[in-house]
Image: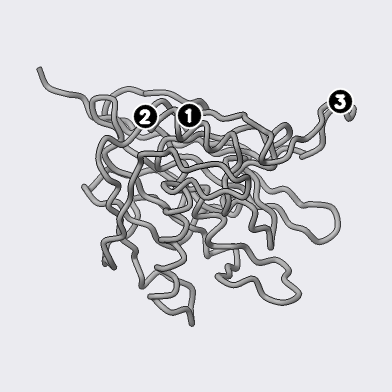
Amino acid sequence: MMKLERLVLGLALVAAGVIGSPAFQHLSSVSGPNKLGPFASMRVHSSASSAESGVAAEGQVEVQSACTDGAYRSTGYRWTTRLNWRFKASSRPKGWSSSGTAATLARAANNITNGRNDCGLPDAISATNLYRGKTSRAPNIGSGGGCRGRDGYNVVGFGTLPSGYLALTCWWTYNGRIVEADIKLNKAYYHWYIKRPSGCTRKWSVEAAATHEFGHAFGMAHVSENLHPSLTMSPVIKACQSSERTLGWGDLRGLQALY
């Protein structure tokens, strides 16, 4: 019997400004079902997360710290092999070094597989990844935010996405397991940094955003921004915010449940 190949889902990380009141940006509508789960074979779907207010209704919800918040959501899909990925170095922001950018992305991937955290919690995650070098291939993600067909390569790169997307991950499954994942960081509408600049404004951390996106690549889904903003897998990131580089208790629990 022929196995069916499925593209499961793309998830976008949303940016929020930090000057004055947070200017949460979002895409008002997207094509395809806006939910997690498998879809019909050989169909492409994309689900963009929209920004929430970040304020609990009537002040009834107390925001927990990253080390005490155990919430997580997963897609239910996982890698059964090592994630070998490549970087489209030519896509990096102008003036950046290829090696420095690649090293930052590698740290982000390792933040997930090594369970990096500031909570003193051990790494009990069996997932692995390996950076395999530069490639001329681009992530199979369109400028409109749609996931394209898979090509057998896992690629991370910068490029154009809609203005409401800070970054986007697409992944493909085969027979219930993840077989490919691509990540794109939006350089058309956002300015990035590797080392946080003095007096930082309106710039976003590559490592923070990429850690979140690698979380998706390894099967993690978004948690509520209103209820769980301290976790890496919350869908909104503010300018100059770097806390997503270290996982919270819920992020670790989710990865440990998968691996």
Q: Which of the 4 image quarters holds residue 258?
A: top left
Percent from the top left, x then y, of residue 235? 61, 42
Question: Tag 3's secondary structure?
Answer: loop
Q: CA distance from mark 2 to mark 1?
A: 8 Å
Residue 256: image quadrant is top left
Q: Which mark is residue 77?
A: 2
* First of labels 1, 3 by sequence position: 3
Q: Residue furthest bottom?
A: 95
The residue to which callout 3 is attached is 60
The answer to which of 37 and 67 lies nearer the viewer is 67
In three-dimensional space, the C-alpha distance between marks 3 and 2, rounded to whole angstroms, equals 34 Å
Residue in the image at 56% along x and 35% along y: 222
Residue 99 % position (x, y): 38, 75
Q: Mark 3: which amino acid?
A: Gln
Judged left or right of residue 203, residue 45 is: left
Quick one: 38 or 207, which is closer to the camera?
207
The colour scheme of the drawn protein is: one colour
